[in-house]
């Protein structure tokens, strides 16, 4: 078993830990009689978010919500930063220790696909170079002048049913609807109001007596057949992500949230970013529509006979959220979205910059195949400090749709992928 895993690219301590872990998986999933059989890694598919970037637009919050000057960035809006590229290289180096020998010496064993944005293309290049430095990087992408339906499904030629999507979002809410959500997250909105310096006159626009984020009720809106939220939580989610990106990009602490947002505050506020996806991306009908094109690539990478040993798909946080909702995958990693407000909160599963869902297909000598799904991510401090990563940055996820805490029979997993409509 150890020899087999070493051939698969897991060396040293990683061999021992993976052997122990997969032995437990085998005993739980296949029974003790088969647990001692050698298992070999057959295919890997990585679905990854791009690395650290600035905001995608110059104005992060509505006019009048802060009089403060925003920190500058070293690249244009929405581009991968230089520091972000270095952090992505750390992820590639970690995954090279897991999958480098699995890829072998043949430069034709890796397929890399990215969305057409600069941040996704440059992330794919940096990651692939670190993952397999002996081979030249070729990044596939769609036409540069149109949305790629794999990564931007709601902008594809076949539009979603906007009414059905709104109904799905409304139906996923608990008692009290969005008003209850607003009330629950009011403490985090107050924190953001304090950072912005805008919660009472004279900072408010149009002479209003109050302009706090909690004074802006959240509502669902249909924007070109895509469900969005509007109101305080929408602005709060964007702002919380910007603060996280400032910290992860190693900006001086006195400029991160204007010196009023330490690491723990930023981690707490990331719950708002996760919450937005929980509301508008993870409800089942929305998630299925959003995930279907990329899951077709996942299926191809795991099961097609004419594809590479390893496939890497570099997209956006929304892509991971859609897949998470479609396959009922949940993660808490990197210290993000801890949500100290309540243990049963909606906010979880925040897709970190560079974070990835990794699908592995394993096969034993008798031809039995299983699929394992991992979530791999850096912590905020690892991104900020460009720390070398250890294997504990990757976690096996429970597969509730397979009724398993570890592995899923490959045929059953393939059927699950086909069921996403």
Image (tube, helix red, strand yellow):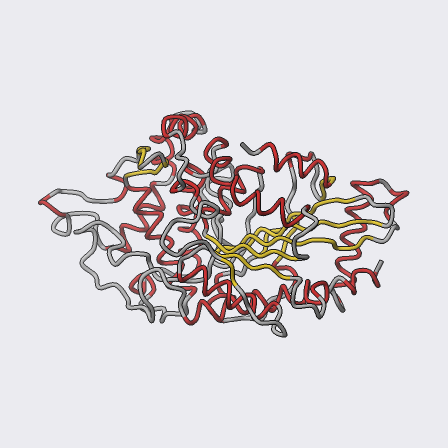
Q: Nearer the viewer, residue 319 or 217?
A: 319
Q: Nearer the viewer, residue 373 or 102?
A: 102
Residue 308, compared with residue 126, is above or below; it is above
Q: Is residue 233 left or right of residue 335?
A: left
Looking at the image, how many numbered discs can be counted on the residues?
0
Farthest residue, direction bottom: 134
Residue 267: image quadrant is bottom left
Q: What residue lies at 75% left-to-right and 59% top-to-bottom?
A: 17
Picture coordinates of residue 332, whole percent (x, y): 55, 49
Farthest residue, direction right: 33
Residue 409, compared with residue 47, is above or below; it is above
Q: Nearer the viewer, residue 238 or 297?
A: 297
Q: Quadrant of the N terminus?
A: bottom right
Q: Is residue 192 left or right of residue 25?
A: left
Q: Is residue 204 left or right of residue 61?
A: left
Q: What residue lies at 56% left-to-right and 59% top-to-bottom?
A: 112
Q: What residue lies at 44% left-to-right and 39% top-to-bottom?
A: 281
Residue 93: image quadrant is bottom right
Residue 48, compared with residue 388, is above or below; it is above
Picture coordinates of residue 243, whole percent (x, y): 36, 58
Farthest residue, direction left: 207
Q: What residue lies at 42% left-to-right and 51% top-to-bottom?
A: 270
Picture coordinates of residue 228, whole percent (x, y): 34, 38
Residue 124, compared with residue 38, is above or below; it is below
């Amino acid at each position: 078993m150890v020899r087999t895993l070493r051939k698969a690219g897991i060396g040293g301590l990683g061999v021992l830990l993976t052997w122990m872990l997969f032995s437990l998986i085998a005993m739980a999933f296949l029974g003790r009689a088969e647990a001692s059989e050698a298992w070999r890694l057959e295919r890997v598919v990585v679905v990854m978010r791009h690395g650290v970037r600035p905001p995608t637009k110059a104005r992060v919050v509505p006019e009048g919500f802060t009089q403060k000057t925003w920190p500058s960035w070293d690249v244009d809006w929405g581009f991968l930063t230089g520091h972000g590229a270095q952090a992505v290289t750390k992820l590639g180096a970690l995954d090279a220790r897991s999958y480098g020998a699995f890829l072998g010496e043949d430069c034709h064993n890796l397929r890399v696909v990215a969305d057409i944005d600069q941040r996704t293309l440059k992330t794919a290049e940096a990651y692939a170079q670190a993952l397999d430095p002996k081979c030249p990087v070729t990044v596939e992408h769609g036409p540069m002048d149109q949305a790629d339906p794999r990564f931007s499904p709601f902008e594809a030629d076949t539009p979603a049913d906007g009414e059905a999507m709104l109904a799905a979002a409304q139906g996923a809410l608990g008692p009290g609807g969005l008003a209850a959500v607003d009330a629950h997250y009011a403490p985090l909105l107050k924190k953001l109001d304090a950072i912005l310096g805008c919660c009472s006159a004279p900072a408010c626009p149009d002479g209003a007596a109050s302009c706090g984020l909690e004074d802006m009720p959240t509502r669902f809106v249909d924007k070109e057949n895509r469900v969005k939220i509007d109101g305080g939580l929408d602005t709060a989610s964007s702002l919380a992500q910007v603060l996280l990106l400032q910290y992860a990009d190693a900006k001086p602490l006195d400029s991160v949230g204007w010196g009023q947002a330490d690491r723990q505050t930023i981690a707490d506020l990331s719950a708002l970013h996760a919450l937005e996806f929980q509301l508008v991306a993870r409800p089942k009908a929305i998630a299925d529509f959003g995930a279907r094109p990329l899951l077709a690539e996942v299926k191809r990478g795991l099961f097609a006979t004419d594809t590479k040993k390893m496939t890497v798909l570099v997209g956006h946080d929304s892509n991971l959220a859609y897949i998470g909702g479609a396959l009922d995958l949940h993660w808490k990693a990197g210290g993000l979205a801890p949500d100290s407000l309540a243990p049963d909160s909606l906010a979880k599963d925040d897709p970190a910059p560079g974070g990835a869902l990794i699908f592995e297909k394993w096969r034993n000598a008798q031809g039995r195949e299983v699929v394992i799904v991992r979530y791999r991510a850096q912590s905020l401090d690892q991104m900020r400090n460009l720390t070398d990563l250890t294997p504990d940055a990757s976690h096996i996820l429970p597969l509730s749709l397979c009724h398993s805490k570890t592995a899923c029979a490959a045929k059953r997993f393939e059927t699950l992928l086909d069921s996403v409509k």
